[in-house]
Image (cartoon, rainbow, N blue to C red):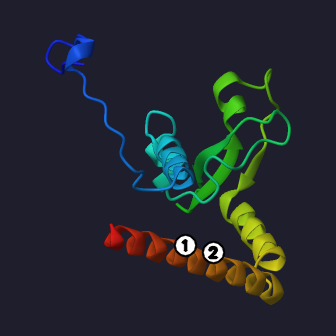
Amino acid sequence: MEHRTGRRKPESDIVYSDAPAIIEQETFDRVQASLKARNPRVTPSRVITGPILLTGLAVCATCGGAMTLRTGTSHRGDIYKYYTCSTHARQGKTRCKGRSIRMDKLDTLVTQHLSERLFQPPRLTELLTALASRRADKAAAAEGRAALLRRN
């Protein structure tokens, strides 16, 4: 394609050349998936970088809608934060009865559950061993590619 006009060049002007792959197809596919997932046109940046722990993860048990931030202030001026059903907030009680839970309570429940189930020493040992093995395999593969390139 000609970049100025957007028209396709004649077939006689196109030069084809085989070239070795710089990276493995699996690595390329993983990076492309990561770029697609982080694309702000697909996932808003506030979901990725926002200060709310469970943004995009917490869902309403009644309707399955997303739980969003809602704040409240007491008569003394204390500010409270809640996860509340966005379907109820947007469409009213006819769509969902509207569940709410204090943000600090749900965040604490989730992090405690994760720490009790996932972050136990035997599990961490298994995860870190697998990670170290994968890193060693990748380093060996990279060294092999570098040696091959040095020979050529």
Give the position of the C terminus as an image quadrant: bottom left
Compared across the picture, whether 144 is left or right of 86 comes to left
Q: Position of residue 28 (x, y in %)?
A: 49, 50
Residue designated by label 2: 134
Q: Residue at x 80, y 84 (%)?
A: 120
Q: Residue at x 69, y 22 (%)?
A: 91
Q: Residue at x 46, y 46 (%)?
A: 35
Q: Position of residue 111 (x, y in %)?
A: 72, 71
Q: Position of residue 110 (x, y in %)?
A: 75, 65
Residue designated by label 1: 138
Q: Secondary structure at mark 2?
A: helix
Give the position of the N terminus as an image quadrant: top left
Dot 1 and dot 2 residues touching (CB under 8 Å): yes
Tell me where residue 74 sits by quadrant. bottom right
- Direction front: furthest residue: 152
Up-down: is 105 above or below 42? Answer: below
Front in this rendered view, residue 51 or 29: 29
Q: Residue at x 43, y 39 (%)?
A: 40
**Mark 1 and mark 2: span between their CA atoms?**
6 Å
Q: Amino acid at mark 1?
A: Lys
Front in this rendered view, residue 4 or 80: 4
Q: Amino acid at mark 2?
A: Arg
Up-down: is 151 above or below 77? Answer: below
Q: Residues within 10 Å of mark 1 (few under 14, many from 20)?
A: few
Compared across the picture, whether 56 is left or right of 29 comes to right
Say how many tags the image has: 2
Q: Which numbered circle lies on residue 14? A: none
Up-down: is 53 above or below 94? Answer: below
